[in-house]
Image (cartoon, rainbow, N blue to C red):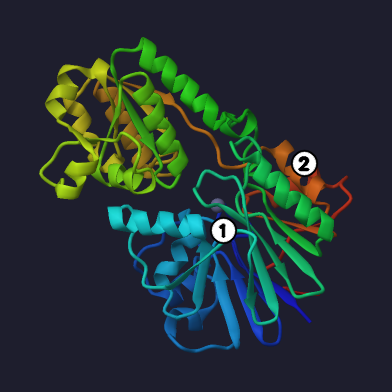
Amino acid sequence: MTTVRFLNGLTTIGGNIMEITTATSRVIMDFGMADNGSAADPEILIAEHRLPALKSLFTNPTDHRYQHEAIFISHLHLDHTAALQYLKSDIPVYLSHDSYRLYQSLAASGLAIPLGVNLHAFEYEHHIQIGDLTVTGYASDHDAFGATAFLISDGQHHFGHSGDVRLHGPHVERVQHWMNVFRSLHLDLFMLEATSFSFEPSDNIEFSVPASEDDIQQSFSQLLQTDDRLQVINPYPRNLERLLRFNQTANAYNRPVVWELPYARLLNSFYPEALIHVLASNRLNKQDLASLIPVGLPIIKHEPQRFSLQNSYANLALLTEVKPFMYLHSNGEPLGEYDPRYASLMNFITDNDGELRHLGSSGHATRQALVAIAKTVNAQTTGIWHTFQPETAEKAMQDLDTNILLPAYDATYTF
Ligand SMILES: [Zn+2]
């Protein structure tokens, strides 16, 4: 008998964690938090439903209730990984080879905190045996490098996990591939993220008319050609491919992006052949000087039409030196109004002669695309989570040939 339990994230965006167990084996899918957490006691965080109720994993390094067990991470966004910082157990934590490399580079560049956990990388479509459970990761498309969808099997039953996914990104063929594999197995249960059902389409343009990664670069190239003000970009470093594309577009129009040092190092470690400019400072070491092109702030200030500048929120004050500027918000932090820093960012831009433009692309499929995914996968049961509005998603999918499950925390589902 195989059982499924849901440990968190049924009505939040992120923090969604499920556990699949047999008598001897357990896999836990994702290990995030819906908020970024703070250095509080894990027991309090469990009581507040911010950490999953897996107390021994947070308190006991070697208490193994299962002979075979592992945690699998679908991608490196904090809402899927933040609980790892509280992990005390030496339970293996698996992530895709791409995510693993990204994590190593982020940590080495100072863009992620090093985690003292037992990390393992897997190759896409290689089966990983955790006792009598088999887990297979499939490359997917989300706005995080290395994003994965999972298939979990006990030999008789098959469970799918969409991870976070979109159909308007550059790798839609990957999604098509895993959807076809899942479909052919007529899954017992397919867990689908339903972020876009959280918002009224008219309220949030990002979720109704999805801009693609291509659209971002098209708008950016237009600005590079027509606007002489300094073009400031604020992307999210875990969307590594977008960083590279910004770098390429800006180089093509002879207005190279001057990156902050951690971003420049990150890009260089993945794409050593790329021409990467970095903001000059005394923090550049010998290796940086050999692989990056330093540009000083005075020259950027003097000739803004020759450059673009990547700026993260922590270094916002630097923009007082380069006004007027165009501020291109590209899904970097602070991400939106729910973050109190967002209002400060908006005020800062207005007060400093900046003009704000949103140049983002969502990592999440639209409502229609989510219905299409559920329809294509055609599982026996489709479970909805990773959304504020599971009932709205259920309604939109009621005519499909799949049972819709809105999971409950205190239930155990047996197969
Ligand atoms: Zn997520």
- Residue type of the residue flagged with mark 1: Ser
Foreground pick, 325 / 73: 73
Q: Is residue 280 above or below residue 17?
A: above
Choose top left, top right, bottom left or bottom right for residue 176: top right
Crowding around mark 1 (Cα neighbors within 10 Å: few <14, some 14 to 19, many 20+) is many
Mark 1 lies within 8 Å of ligand 1 (Cβ measured): no
Residue bearing mark 1: 74
Crowding around mark 2 (Cα neighbors within 10 Å: few <14, some 14 to 19, many 20+) is some
Residue 34 visible in the current orientation: no
Residue bearing mark 2: 372
In what quadrant of the picture does the C terminus appear?
A: bottom right
Q: Residue furthest top?
A: 226
Q: Is residue 293 left or right of residue 130?
A: left
In what quadrant of the picture does the N terminus appear?
A: bottom right
Kindly identify the residue that appears in the image at 29 percent across and 46 percent down: 265
Kindly identify the residue that appears in the image at 58 percent across and 88 percent down: 65
